[in-house]
Amino acid sequence: MTINPNPTASHFVNGTYIDDTDGQPIEVIYPSTEACIATINAATSEVIERALVSAAAAQAEWAQWSGTERGRVLRRAAEIMRERNHELSVLETFDTGKPYQETSVADATSGADALEYFGGIAATLTGEHIQLADGNWAYTRREPLGVCAGIGAWNYPTQIACWKAAPALACGNSMIFKPSQTTPLCALKVAEILCEAGLPRGVFNVIQGHGDVGEALILDPRVDKVSLTGSVPTGSKVYAAAAASLKHVTMELGGKSPLIIFGDADIENAVSGAIMGNFYSSGQVCSNGTRVFVERKIKDIFLKRLQERLTSVVVGDPQDPLTNYGPLVSGQQLAIVQDFVRKGIDEGARLVAGGSRCQREGFFMQPTVFADVTDDMTIAREEIFGPVMSVLDFETEEEVLERANRTEFGLAAGVFTRDLARAHRIIAQIEAGTCFINSYNDAPVEVPFGGMKLSGVGRENARAAIEHYSQLKSVFVRMGDLPSPF
Ligand code: NAD
């Protein structure tokens, strides 16, 4: 079956596809061929208004459904996503350029997990009963926030839409989701599937556009909550705009995470961790462990095995299931990564693998490894968001811990060692929200995901996400007469 990436229309509002050709055209470029595969229009103020009106009206009705009923819709949507995994994975590959080998196991599947998980717990979201003195008591009601705005990054368009929609909808909210202008296709399919699963019109809407469309949502008084996945500079702007009307926020932002490999680690697993944490999705993963601290005594063997393992990279057409390494998402992202590589070389890091654009069409960049990187180099301090690994040497546990924490980011961290007491000791002192021991970049829906410091506010996934999509109302109940001074 040939899958046409061209969407039915640009936006999905109030249960149907709509368009407004007055909106600024946005070309969707397939990163593997650099060809334009679809053209959509950014949302005009009329489209934004329609989405806001629909989301507000639908939310009032949706919140009246029981948790069991809401959960049933989400779980049905999860089933449909799994049934259509192939089609959705091909589309995700068109949208992002990530290889089908990845998208077929990591995107619609992860989205379906979120819908299933939050569909499963929707019926268990309750308040509590609190006994007080003199027979009085109180209870709490867990209530939705209202209309949520979801704003996505371009690296995981299906997953991000589902990670935000699933807990929001489970709690009785509605959502207007604005995908990244770079990858606008997948979220439309999520909306279509939710509707097919029985979601009332207007509960989940998708509108397209650049940052100004996101900003219009954040500034609107009908929006109660903003959940952003994006870079730290965008996060600061969005947080500030939301603060003007004290909206609830979830911020999933960037990182420069440390991956610490001790001399006693299983070398093959440590190399696997460094590969997974730097080259999966061509390095375009927020939680990547891009500062790889390797204990000096195993540095040579680590680098040798890493270089050998990199010979198994299969660069090619991302839709070919044998390809395991795809292009970067855009020409702009490729230029950013190339600029960082130049800075690495200029500042004295030793290039031991890659470093160049691949000799073929598409935005392909070789997996790149720098050794002898020092903490002050630009490539060790700033988020690159591409396939560039920095290997730094260390001698002692105390030293590496201090250096690992010396960053404004705090999204993730990993430790490889056979000494589990040391692993837990290190992780307890690491300033990062999502940590791994002898593994890297696992993100099961049952586990909270998010960052500390500049990397974020709030958590996605797990029960923790419920706290960020609902609010408590406390109700005091007096059983006897009310004493009063007058
Ligand atoms: P970006 O910050 O450029 O854009 C993110 C989204 O914000 C886009 O939809 C964009 O249109 C929108 N936006 C931009 N300016 C806005 C404004 N003023 N108001 C409202 N919306 C606005 O990020 P990107 O380049 O799409 O994605 C890459 C970044 O995302 C990286 O920094 C990466 O680390 C981060 N990221 C974080 C996570 C996480 O879960 N922590 C996951 C994926 C990506």
Image: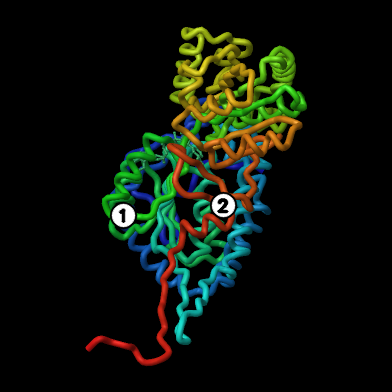
Q: Amino acid at mark 1?
A: Leu
Q: Is residue 192 above or below residue 434?
A: below
In the rendered image, residue 165, in percent from the top left (x then y), is placed at 50, 55
The residue where tag 1 is placed is 246
Residue 321: mark in rendering = none
Figure quadrant of the N terminus? top right
* Residue, far front: 485
Q: Residue at x 63, y 22 (%)?
A: 396
Q: Residue at x 40, y 50 (%)?
A: 207
State the CA–CA distance, disc 2 to disc 1: 23 Å
In the rendered image, residue 391, in percent from the top left (x then y), is placed at 60, 18
Q: Mark 1: few, some, or many residues within 10 Å (few <14, many ≥20)?
A: few
Q: Residue at x 45, y 19 (%)?
A: 335
Q: Nearer the viewer, residue 365 or 47?
A: 365
Q: Nearer the viewer, residue 139 or 182?
A: 139
Tell me if I can see residue 189 in this picture.
Answer: no
Q: Residue at x 66, y 58 (%)?
A: 79
Q: Amino acid at mark 2?
A: Asn
In the rendered image, residue 27, in percent from the top left (x then y), is placed at 42, 34
Q: Mark 2: few, some, or many residues within 10 Å (few <14, many ≥20)?
A: many
* Residue, far left: 486
Q: Label 1, secondary structure: give it.
A: loop
Q: Is residue 173 above or below residue 64?
A: above
Quadrant of ligand 1: it is top left
Q: Label 2, secondary structure: give it.
A: loop
Q: Nearer the viewer, residue 173 or 447?
A: 447
The residue where tag 2 is placed is 461
In the rendered image, residue 133, in percent from the top left (x then y), is placed at 46, 82
Figure quadrant of the C terminus? bottom left
Q: Write down the quadrant of residue 320 in the picture.
A: top right
Ligand 1 within 8 Å, label 1 CB: no
Tell me if I can see residue 370 in this picture.
Answer: yes
